[in-house]
Image (cartoon, coloured by chain):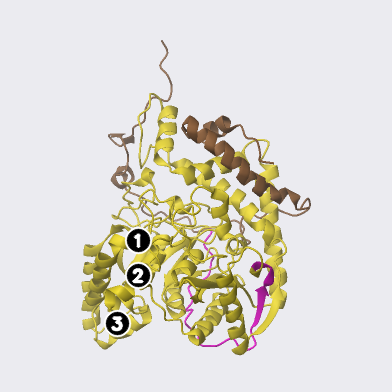
Chain colours: A yellow, B brown
Amino acid sequence: MTELCDLAGHELAARLRSGEASALDAVESSLARIEATEPEVSAFLARSADDAREQARTIDERIAAGDDLPAVAGIPLALKDVLTTRGVTTTCGSRILETYVPPYDCTVWARLKEAGSMLVGKTNCDEFAMGSSNENSAFGPVHNPWDLTRVPGGSSGGSAAAVAAGQATWALGTDTGGSVRQPAALTGVVGMKPTYGRPSRYGLIAFASSLDTVSTFTRDVRDAATLLSAIVGHDPLDATSIQRPPEDYTDGLEGGVEGLRIGVLRDWLGEGVEPGVRARTEEAIGRLENLGAKIGEATLPHADYALSAYYLIAPAECSSNLARYDGVRYGHRAEGANVIEMMMRTRGEGFGDEVKRRIMLGTYALSAGYYEAYYGQAQKVRTLVLRDFEAAWEEFDLLLSPTSPTVAFPIGAKADDPLAMYLSDVYTIPANLAGTPAISVPCGLDDQGLPVGLQLMGRALDEATVLRAAHAFEQDLGFDARPPLLQELTS
Amino acid sequence: MPVEIDIEHVARLARLGLTPEELERFREQLGMILEHAERVTEVAAEDVPPTAHPLPSSNVFRPDEPRDGLGREDALANAPDREGDFFKVPPIVEEAE
């Protein structure tokens, strides 16, 4: 029998409404799965079992009273530990915030809580969301439920693994250069990054402010549409939040891909792509064509330079944002004879390797004499990437590629080679630079039995088309493989 | 060619206390990363305007209405050190002899 924690959110919601299950049953199912799998997976940094149970009881009372509940009510949720939660530690996977208890909620959690969502815990991540493997967490790596010796991807690796392992029905992460789509691909779940500015960034502890986007991990595309609908919409507390009301992305989800023009980024299927990833992507293209999509070849001519531009822009914004960790108002403080010595020691002790590397890189790129050559030039390249997308939208409604050039790699494989790690994000970064919505949807397993993700990118604010196509593909493929860890558990 | 960096200068600007071993490692790694990142300079973009933000937006205004901010105790709750209602830090200005 399928356990409640293995259902998609919309399936669970139906059972809550029919009275087959209670919200408390749903929470207990998730908490039991966390107990059973957490020793192997290590997806969580903090658990909030008591709060979740309390939220569940409230939902059950409302159901009993006949209230019309929002779609996300009574569904167990996990949040990446860069999203502030009032009263629940929020560490960003960093020693420098190890004991930080936020005095306020981020807007996306405030909205979900108001709608009856139940928080089971805060998930592990690369320190300050900087990384592609979750190995940069100060609190140890997350293990991929599909193969515990491999990474779940990153930086939102804990959220991805939690959803893949049934520890939470769905989860939020943040996608700055692929940090939701890449781990979704590597753990066989759906990862949806909306348009930059569509969900509020208020309370998302900043890494790179012009790129950071709250994004979703779900079991299927319908859930992505549901969860996303609950978090988007203008927020006066975030000046970069788009002035548009929320919309219901489940409307029109069943519309299919008949006549939709999909541009395949052929250049991204050549050298450097694993054979298994290429094979599943090619099959996906065939499947979409059979469903009636018009397939053509697309290019983003400046995509080759996007990675280089990103690794100047993101570290530059990071070095500026992370200046706030000075040992004065919150977080770790080291001893020092004067304030400068205190700050230097605090930051030297509190930050891990990758964060230090990016602060240094960004500080250099912004420093006198180098600003124009590096940061200024990277911003111009960003314009060219944006123009590439604009040109592509004249011919196509969506762009298609693999999400990641590889499947999940072994823990430790790239740990000593930052540049090799950065290349994990080569296909996801362009959508961040351009701010466009993009999804990773499972498209099968490679011959080692590891999940492969298909990426679909759409026009700014056209989440609906991205979701509609991903849904049609997903329904046609019928991907129902489960991580070996769960097969052992429930057999 | 890996890029040569005055790593001690950058660490000072960033207020990062790094060990000699870290300085050496970052000098080497940043040199390699910048060699890759420098590829942006190959793109002819003299007359291309920079993009700081993916979506066009100008000044965003909201009504200037008073509302509650973070309370004093909430704001001080995470302070590593405090004195009364103040954040307390080590000396900033050295006392004159």
Q: Amino acid at mark 2?
A: Ala
Which numbered disc, 3 or 2, marks the residue that appears first in the sequence? 3
Tell me whether the residue at label 2 lies in contact with that at label 1, contact meaning CB atoms closer than 8 angstroms.
yes
Numbered label attached to residue A2: 3
Quadrant in the picture for the N terminus of chain A: bottom left
Q: Is residue A217 left or right of residue A361?
A: left
Which numbered disc, 2 or 1, marks the residue that appears first in the sequence? 1
Q: Is residue A217 above or below residue A251?
A: above
Numbered label attached to residue A165: 2
Instruction: Write the start and end of the magenta stretch as one range.
Output: A240-268
Residue where numbered disc 1 is placed = A43
- Kindly report the distance in space between the C-alpha atoms of the residues bearing marks 2 and 1: 9 Å
Mark 3, secondary structure of its residue: loop
- Kindly report the distance in space between the C-alpha atoms of the residues bearing marks 3 and 1: 22 Å
Mark 1, secondary structure of its residue: loop
Q: Position of residue A57 (x, y in %)?
A: 21, 73
Q: Nearer the viewer, residue A263 or A147?
A: A147
Q: Amino acid at mark 1?
A: Ala
Work out which residue is located at the far top of the displayed protein and give it. B97
* Residue A109 highlighted magenta (yes or no): no
Q: Is residue B38 left or right of residue A483?
A: right
| Chief SS of the magenta region | loop
Q: Nearer the viewer, residue B33 or A115?
A: B33
